[in-house]
Image: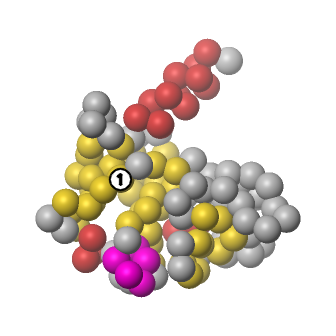
Amino acid sequence: MADTQLTDIGALDQIPRRGARVVRVAQGCLAVFRTADDQAFALEDRCPHKGGPLSQGIVHGRSVTCPLHNWVLSLETGEAQGADEGRALAFPLKVEEGRILIDLSALAVRAALGKAS
């Protein structure tokens, strides 16, 4: 993440442990998660199965369970677990001095690819 521009999206302690917060950006909504051990992760707020709001899912360990059909996704990669297949876009982030800094460049790349097709 050395060559990327990071966006400050708020304080880690604004997100409940084992919970999420929705962050709205020009290209859509992100779900920013906080685990029980205060790790932070960000995924697009859309399950790859039927578009369920991942931000309303249950956080357990380093996974989130979609509230619609119980798909389990890795918070680290966005990849569906078990027999399910699919992936939610994951965003690199880091926590510095209690602030969550996220790299939104993946959204710009996806937007550019969408315009090209």
Q: Outermost residue toward the top?
A: 116
Residue 77, given in percent of the width and then of the height, sits at 57, 55
Q: Is residue 56 above or below residue 36?
A: above
Give x and y (percent) for residue 31.
Answer: 47, 61
In this figure, which colouring scheme has been used for the structure? Answer: secondary structure
Question: Would you name the residue on which mark 1 appears?
Answer: 93
User: How crowded is the residue under tag 1: few (<14 C-alpha within 10 Å), some, or many (20+)?
Assistant: some
Q: The N terminus is located in which quarter?
A: top left
Q: Residue at x 19, y 60 (%)?
A: 96
Image quarter (top left, top right, bottom left or bottom right) of the C terminus: top right
Q: Horizontal placement of 70 versus 17: left or right?
A: right
Magenta-colored stretch includes residue 57: no
Q: In the image, residue 56 lies at what x, y percent? A: 55, 74
For residue 47, what is the image quadrant? bottom right
Determine whether, in the image, residue 44 is placed left or right of residue 38.
right
Q: Quadrant of residue 25?
A: top left
The extreme right residue here reads 83
Residue drawn 51% across the image and 56% down it: 43
Q: Which residues are magenta?
A: 34-38
Q: What secondary structure is the magenta-colored segment mainly?
A: loop
Circle 1: element type: strand
Kindly identify the residue that appears in the image at 50 percent across and 28 percent down.
109
Q: Position of residue 35 (x, y in %)?
A: 43, 77
Going by the image, does 10 lie left or right of 39? left
- Quarter residue 103 falls in: top left
- Work out whether residue 1 or residue 70 is closer to the camera in this orientation and state it: 1
Pick out the residue farthest to the front. 2
Residue at x-position 45% and y-position 58%: 42
Q: Is residue 29 visible?
A: no
Task: Say if 73 sits above or below 107 in the image.
Answer: below
Residue type, numbered disc 1: Leu
